[in-house]
Amino acid sequence: MTPSREEIVSENREYTLFSWSVQSAANPITMVGGHGSHFVDADGNEWLDIASQLININVGHQHPKVIEAIKKQVDELCFAAPAFATEARGKLGKKLAEVTGLAKSFFTLGGSEANENAMKIARLVTGRDKIITRYRSYHGATMGSMTASGDPRRWPVEPGIPGIVRAFDPYCYRCPFGKEPTSCRRECVSHIEEIIQMEGPHNVAAIMVEGITGSNGLLVPPDDYYPKLRALCDKYDILLITDEVMSGFGRTGTYLSTQHYGILPDIVTSAKGLTSGYMPLGAVIVNQRIADFFENSMLWGGLTYSSHPVSCAAALANLQVYEEEHLFENATLLGAYLAERLEGMRASYACVGDVRYKGLFTVIELVRDKETKEPLAPFNGTSPEMQKLAGHLKSKYLYAFSRFNMLWICPPLVITKDELDFALSAIEEGLALVD
Ligand code: PLP
C-alpha cells in the first residue's frame, strides 16, 4: 500500500536531515510522481512547477525518452571507474564540444564540484592563485565553491579557502556605483581592472562569474558587459570561467547564456540542465589551450563516480530531447511572451520594482515604494508580505522559488502557454494581495 503524506513526512523528518533547513521548521511537500510541467504529491494534488524544482528539470518531470536511455544504460553497464573509456562518456564529450565551441569536458557529480575543479584547473594552468568572483553569486555548497560564492550562504564557512577576491555586480536596478543608465561608464567592469591592479595581475588566475546570476536576483548584464570582461581577461592573460550551472542548457534559449553576448569563456561549468536532474552530473568544459596543458601535466582530481556512465547516458538523451522537441525555441518564444507580461506587471503594480528576464529565466523584484526602492523584504530575510504571496501561490498548487524580496518564474522548457497563463494569473492575484 502506498504510504500516506503524513507517513512519508514523519519518516523523512525522523530519520533524515533536510538541506538548508532548521529541522524543526522543515515542512516538505511530498512528491510521488509527475509529468511535463507538473509534479504530483502524496495526496494526489498536481502542482505546476514554475521553479523547475531547483531550476534544473528543464525537460520537465518524468520524460519518457530520458527514462528509457537510463534504463538501457543500466541494463548494459551500471558502472565504470573514471579511468575507463565508455561510449556514453566519449559521445557526451563530443556533443559538449560541438555546442559550446570549447574542447574537452571533465565530468563531475554536480555544479559545486565542477566549480571546485574549474578553480583548481585555473590555478594549475596559470600558476597563479587568486580567483576574482562577485558578491551576488552562488557557486555551490562545498568548501571552495561556497567560499567563491558571494551571497550570505558563504558566511558559515568563512574564512573558507584562501585566494578569493570579490567584486561588485552588474546590478543595474540598484547600481553599486550609484549610476543611472545615462551616467553609466560600466564601472562594474572598470573596478575589476582596479582590483586586478591592486591584487597584482601576475597573481590572478581567473575571474569566475555566473553566466547570468541566478539565485542572487537574476542579474542580466548590459550587452557590452561580457565583451568588456573578455577583453579585460585577455589584457592580463586571466582565464574567464563562466558558471552556467543554472543559466545554461536552454534556460535562456541557448546552450550557454554568454552566447547571447558573442563571447567564448575559457572554462564553462555546467550541471542542472545538463541532465535535467535525472541523474547527478556536472561538467568542466575547457578550451584547447587548457586541454593541451594537461597533455603533459597531471590533472589532479576525480572521484569514484566521476563520468558515471548512467549519468552520461541521461545527459545525452536529455540533450537529444532539447533538440528533437525544439525546447530552446520554446524557451525563446514563451520567454518573449513572459517578458511582455512581466513588463505589464511592472506598469500595473506598485509593489513591482523591477522585472528581469532572458528566455525562461526571470524574476520579479518587489518593493514597498517604487520611488525609494525599499525592498518588500530585507536582504537575507523575509517579510509577512512575501509570506502572504508565497502562501497564495501554494494555495493554487503553484510551486515557485522566492528568496528575500524576489520571486522567480523559471518553468520547465516544456511549459505550454496555457500553463504559463495559469501561473501568471495566480501571481497577479498574489501581487494584488500585497500591493
Ligand atoms: N552554480 C550555480 C550558479 C548554482 O545555481 C548552483 C546550484 O544552485 C551551483 C553552482 C551548485 O550546483 P550543485 O547544487 O549541483 O552542486
Image (cartoon, rainbow, N blue to C red):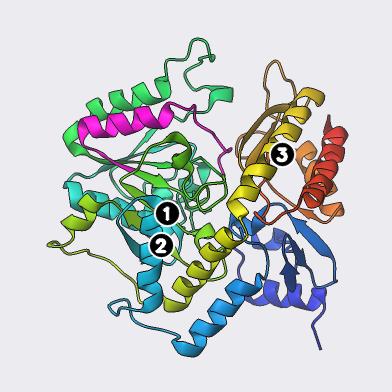
State which tag comes first along the sequence, 3 or 2. Answer: 2
Q: Is residue 3 visible?
A: yes
Q: Is residue 369 above or below residue 247?
A: above
Q: Which mark is residue 287?
A: none
Q: Which mark is residue 95?
A: 2
Query: Which is more foreground, mark 3 or mark 1?
Result: 1
Mark 3 residue type: Leu
Q: Residue at x 85, y 71 (%)?
A: 44
Whole-percent x, y for residue 143 in the image = 39, 56
Q: Residue at x 53, y 84 (%)?
A: 72
Q: Is residue 225 above or below residue 157?
A: above
Q: Which residue is mark 3?
A: 338
Callout 2 secondary element: helix
Whole-percent x, y for residue 21 in the image = 62, 58
Callout 1 secondary element: helix
Q: Which residue is mark 1?
A: 99
Q: Which residues are magenta?
A: 215-240
Would you say residue 225 sits in the magenta stretch? yes
- Considering depth in this image, is 118 or 275 the residue closer to the camera? 275
